Image (cartoon, rainbow, N blue to C red):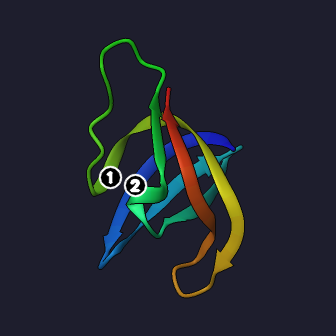
Amino acid sequence: VEGVLLQVDCLDKVARLRVTVGGSPKAFLIQDPNRVVIKNASADGGHEFTCGPQKSVKVALEYILKADPNYGTEGLVRSIEFR
């Protein structure tokens, strides 16, 4: 899915990505950061991945469809490409 990363919520041992996809807000879970591949399509060397509000950066996420009602997420992130 492609969208705009608006916020990263750091919650105990997991992170929730808040992304706007096609004008709709969606949330995705990073359950194990070691299982997420981070890709960068930018020539400037990368994106600073921090908790809290983001500077509306474009991303493409690959995820496994697995809703988690405890976190309000739609799936588990497997890769993030910053654009």
Q: Mark 2 points at which residue?
A: 7
How far is the residue under mark 2 from the one under mark 1?
4 Å
Contact, mark 2 vs mark 1 (Cβ under 8 Å) = yes
Reply above or below: 68 against 8: below
Reply above or below: 15 against 22: below
Amino acid carrying label 1: it is: Pro
Q: Which residue is drawn at 56% across and 57% down?
A: 77
Q: Which of the numbered marks, if any, corresponds to residue 67? A: none
Horizontal arrangement in the rendering, residue 61 relative to residue 11 (left or right): right
Crowding near the residue tagged with mark 1, few <14, some 14–19, many ≥20 C-alpha atoms within 10 Å:
few
Crowding near the residue tagged with mark 2, few <14, some 14–19, many ≥20 C-alpha atoms within 10 Å:
many
Q: Which residue lies furthest to the bottom in this view?
A: 70
Q: Residue at x 69, y 44 (%)?
A: 1
Given residues 79 and 23, the one toward you in this image is 79
Q: Position of residue 20 (x, y in %)?
A: 59, 49
Q: Is mark 2 on a helix, strand or loop?
A: strand
Given residues 1 and 62, the one toward you in this image is 62
Amino acid carrying label 2: it is: Gln
Q: If you read the primary sequence from the N terminus, does the residue marked by circle 2 or circle 1 appear first?
A: 2
Q: What element carries label 1?
A: strand
Q: Name the residue under label 1.
A: 53
Q: Which residue is drawn at 40% across and 55% down?
A: 7
Reply above or below: 83 against 2: above
Horizontal arrangement in the rendering, residue 13 relative to residue 2 (left or right): left
